[in-house]
């Protein structure tokens, strides 16, 4: 059901006048609805119905048949999807020296990445108030399962209360529950260049934990907003089922509060989030701090009869208190004078030029790396284009230009171009 995106500059040019891991056509099969029923502009941007489907724990049914009995109600088909990303990336740094067929290729020399992602996803209804989502990453050397969550959702008055156990190898604690399309959750972002257009993602997976997270989320949602309280740690599939057999103490905390009002014809998400505490990571094989705070805003509406999304975020992560911080990557010894916080502010807009076909975007990031004061400036301008050949086949073009003291060295990255084809079925 989820819309998909892809990108190739030559194809964009050739088709300009023709009529985000994580696309899940399994949901389209369950509901009998097209991708555009849940997505505004392009995948993975959610509209109001898409947010409602997610808040209901993926349990809504449509035309698909059900197997029903006493204490039993599930689809008569196990709904699956395949998600594929193929991309080409190139930056300004020097490519490999020597014969191209004798040395490893790098982004600096222009690199075709096949696959950037290739996943088998299952998802949907387990029971009347229980759903699930499983991502089986078929190119994941660590194992087939890359992420899993199972929402238990209950209607209480005009609200939905959810309990969601989850684990993910890279998407972080927001994988448990999130409604924003601005990049609070890595897989729900308006642009492919996530660190350049999302302040939260600029800090994400900077520690040795690589974005691994396991926990239990308690969420409450109604038409006015949602609250997410999560106990978690920076581990992926902890316990005896993993090679490490460690982690899983759930000593970190995540608090997220957001309002979702509609002002005029504009649907908004305005919220705050805080990760805190420390826990043992079975990815880092060490204790890590999980300390980050953020503010985010998004508004989705129309200008001149075309869809427009506006996004703003600010996020800050200090150095770890004696251990590495999962959102900063650095350590501050107790009592020491440490480098500045790692922080970023991002603002962006995504405008639909041709409805259900072509969107263009512009984003700006002002950031500090958290390193030495003389070399911590890390700013970026990003332009984007998404062309939907079909609702589940698309092309992406992202170009980012970097500036600031972190990019002064002659060998530093000063620009990055990404051309991507993404499809799901």
Image (spheres, rainbow, N blue to C red):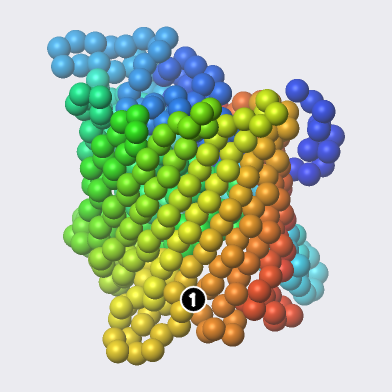
Which residue is at the front of the view, 177 or 280?
177
Q: Looking at the figure, which quarter contains the C terminus?
A: top right
Pinpoint residue 273: horizontal percent, then vertical percent: 35, 54
| Residue 140 picture location, percent across and down | 46, 51
As drawn, which residue projects farthest toward the left? 70
**Residue at (75, 43) in percent of width and height:** 8
Q: Looking at the image, can residue 200 be seen? A: yes
Q: Residue sitting at 28 percent across and 12 percent down? A: 67
Residue 36 falls in image quadrant:
top right
Residue 206 located left or right of residue 149: right
- Outermost residue, front direction? 264
Instruction: Check disc 1: other Cα within 10 Å, few if <14, some if 14-19, many if 20+.
Output: many
In the image, is 152 to the left or to the right of 75? Answer: left
Which residue position holds label 1? 370
Residue 112 picture location, percent across and down: 70, 53
Could you tell me residue 123's position as x and y percent?
A: 38, 30
Q: Nearer the viewer, residue 6 or 100?
A: 6
The quadrant where residue 227 appears = top left
């Amino acid at each position: 059901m989820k819309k998909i995106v892809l990108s190739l500059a030559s194809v964009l040019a050739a088709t300009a006048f023709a009529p985000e891991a994580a696309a899940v056509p399994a949901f389209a099969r369950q509901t009998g609805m097209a991708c555009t029923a849940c997505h505004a502009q392009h995948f993975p941007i959610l509209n109001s119905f898409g947010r409602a489907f997610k808040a209901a724990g993926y349990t809504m049914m449509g035309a698909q048949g059900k197997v029903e009995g006493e204490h039993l109600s599930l689809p008569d088909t196990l709904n699956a999807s395949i998600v594929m990303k193929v991309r080409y990336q190139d930056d300004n740094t020097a490519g490999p020296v020597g014969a191209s067929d004798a040395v490893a290729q790098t982004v600096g020399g222009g690199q075709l990445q096949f696959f950037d992602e290739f996943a088998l996803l299952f998802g949907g209804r387990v029971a009347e108030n229980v759903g699930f989502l499983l991502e089986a990453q078929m190119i994941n050397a660590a194992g087939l399962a890359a992420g899993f969550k199972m929402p238990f959702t209950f209607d209480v008055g005009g609200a939905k209360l959810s309990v969601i156990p989850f684990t993910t190898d890279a998407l972080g604690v927001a994988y448990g529950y999130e409604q924003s399309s601005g990049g609070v959750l890595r897989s729900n972002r308006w642009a492919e260049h996530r660190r350049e257009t999302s302040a939260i993602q600029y800090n994400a997976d900077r520690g040795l934990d690589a974005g691994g997270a396991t926990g239990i989320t308690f969420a409450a949602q109604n038409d006015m907003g949602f609250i997410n309280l999560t106990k978690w740690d920076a581990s992926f599939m902890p316990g005896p089922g993993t090679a490490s057999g460690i982690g899983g103490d759930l000593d970190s905390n995540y608090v997220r509060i957001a309002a979702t009002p509609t002002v005029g014809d504009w649907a908004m998400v305005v919220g705050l989030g805080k990760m805190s505490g420390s826990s043992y990571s079975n990815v880092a094989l060490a204790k890590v701090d999980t300390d980050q705070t953020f503010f985010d805003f998004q508004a989705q509406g129309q200008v001149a009869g075309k869809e427009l999304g506006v996004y703003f975020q600010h996020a800050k992560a200090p150095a770890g208190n004696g251990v590495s911080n999962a959102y900063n990557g650095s350590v501050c010894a107790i009592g020491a004078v440490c480098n500045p916080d790692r922080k970023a502010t991002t603002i962006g807009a995504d405008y639909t030029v041709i409805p259900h076909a072509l969107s263009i975007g512009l984003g700006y990031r002002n950031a500090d790396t958290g390193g030495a004061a003389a070399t911590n400036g890390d700013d970026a301008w990003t332009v984007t284009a998404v062309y939907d050949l079909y609702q589940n086949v698309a092309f992406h073009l992202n170009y980012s230009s970097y500036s600031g003291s972190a990019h002064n060295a002659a060998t530093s990255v000063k620009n990055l171009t990404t051309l991507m084809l993404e499809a799901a079925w």
